[in-house]
Amino acid sequence: QVQLVESGGGLVQAGGSLRLACAASGGTFSGYAMGWFRQAPGKEREFVAGINWRGDSTLYADSVKGRFTISRDNAKNTVYLQMNSLKFEDTAVYYCARRRFGTEGSGDYIYWGQGTQVTVSS
């Protein structure tokens, strides 16, 4: 059974930075794309960033391009999300997920973590 556990969330002032991590266990990590999603109160969950299985191709939502960076360490079964220049509207629960395929994308994610709260104060 694949398990994904996020960490690194917290409270930060606007303009600050946070680094989220997602540790995977069970199943195969290195053969699959990984992604980060977020869900703000009263809103639907949205795609944030994705990375292919090798870690050399990424995809970002327009709202985070140039501010967020997704990366992975296959030796540690961990995917990261570096978030810089945080804005109030980045406040949400952030989820990592494993995709059905090895290529990056915004859909077809089949395993999900429990989420970590990111709160940006204005």
Image (spheres, rainbow, N blue to C red):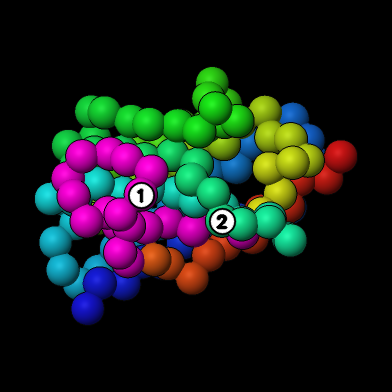
- Can you identify the residue that label 2 sits on? 45
> Toward which corner of the image does residue 16 lie, by quadrant?
top right
Q: Amino acid at mark 2?
A: Arg
Asked if the stretch drawn in magenta spans residue 96, the answer is: yes
Left or right placement of residue 44 versus residue 81 in this view: right
Left or right placement of residue 61 versus residue 111 in this view: right
Locate residue 79, reporting x and y percent. Answer: 35, 48
Mark found first going from the N terminus, 2 or 1: 2
Locate residue 118, reporting x and y percent. Answer: 66, 53
Picture residue at 54% right of the left edge, 27% below the top: 62
Q: Amino acid at mark 1?
A: Gly
Real-space Cα separation, disc 2 to disc 1, in angstroms: 12 Å
Q: Give SS at disc 2.
A: loop
Q: Which residues are magenta?
A: 93-111
Q: How many marks?
A: 2
Category of crowding for the residue at label 1, using alpha-carbon neighbours closer than 10 angstroms: few (below 14), some (14–19), many (at least 20): few
